[in-house]
Image (cartoon, grey):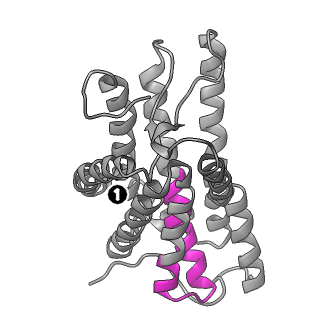
Amino acid sequence: MQAHTGETSGPLPAGGLSRSTLRSETLLVLALSLGASAVSSLISFTGSLTKPGGLKDQAATLNSSYAPGRPWLDLAWQLFGIATALVPVALVAHLLLRERAGGLKAIGFDRTKPWPDLGRGALVAAGIGSAGLAFYLVARAGGFNLTVVPEALPEVWWKFPVLILSALENSVVEEVIVVGYLLRRLGQLGWSPTAALVASSVLRGSYHLYQGIGGFVGNMVMGVVFVLLYRRWGRVGPLVVAHTLLDIGAFVGYALLAGKVSWLPTL
């Protein structure tokens, strides 16, 4: 039997909010989070396309220093950035509580099934990780992608803890908003399951466009897989685990291997 995913149709069961209100709410949440990131990514990609030289000769740096040469100030900025990025997730939790849906529990982001979430997430990460890396290397070699630099932090004691926290923050924000929340709201607004899947997946690809066409396509495909898995399991939890493991592998792996192995591109 297919799991319940929290995707519904019609107005909210509590509060009697109109579709117009729901539509405005969804647009505001996206404007404060991943929708804004998508626009920023498009502008960045346009700049990369119009810059002399090929895409692979340009870099997209994901985690860099905010205050070079001042490690404590840098740490403060790093933690501030991670904390403020999570505010839209807190907003989504509030909005789901308002409709008496149980908050983030309504989309399966809770501690009720820790071991199944961890196991499923680890399996998904293992399956996607190697394929994603291969796709990136091919896309970059073909000139469709910038060189992604997952981290450029100074060699200080907090480097790896911050990279892990950054991976967790990315995962929670993306999976809660672009999968759990967005699919629920689009269902309530009357979107078909196929249209909602396309919207969620294209949005995921769009805010990775700063990496190049390869980043857009690869993440859009990942978005399709994640939506299908969410609908099967009815939980965001495994997706957060999978995404966290993928990002930790990218961030920490790059920090440990950059310049030491020939197959990993650097600038």
Q: What x and y, as percent, mark residue 16?
A: 73, 84
In the displayed structure image, the side of residue 162 where residue 262 appears, left or right: left
The magenta segment is 173-197
Closer to us: 9 or 139: 139
209 or 21: nearer the viewer: 209
Helix, strand or loop under label 1: helix
Question: Image point 24% across, 49% down: which residue?
Answer: 130
Number of marks in the image? Answer: 1
**Could you tell me if residue 115 is visible in this image?**
yes
Placement of the N terminus among the 4 image quadrants: bottom left
Image quarter (top left, top right, bottom left or bottom right) of the C terminus? top left
Q: Position of residue 254 (x, y in %)?
A: 36, 30
Prevalent SS, magenta region: helix
Residue closest to the far top? 69
Q: Is residue 255 left or right of residue 76?
A: left
Q: Is residue 106 visible?
A: no
Front residue of 195/235: it is 195
Q: Amino acid at mark 1?
A: Pro
Q: Is residue 30 magenta?
A: no
**x, y percent for residue 253:** 32, 31
Q: Please, is residue 53 above or below residue 223 in the view?
A: above
Residue 120 on image: x %, y %: 25, 58
Q: Left or right: 176 with respect to 50?
A: left
**Residue displayed at 52% across by 38% down:** 58
Disc 1 target residue: 238
Is 39 positioned to the left or the right of 136 in the image? right
Residue at 62 percent of width and 90 percent of height = 10
| Other residues around mark 1 within 10 Å, as few (<14) / some (14–19) / many (≥20) | many
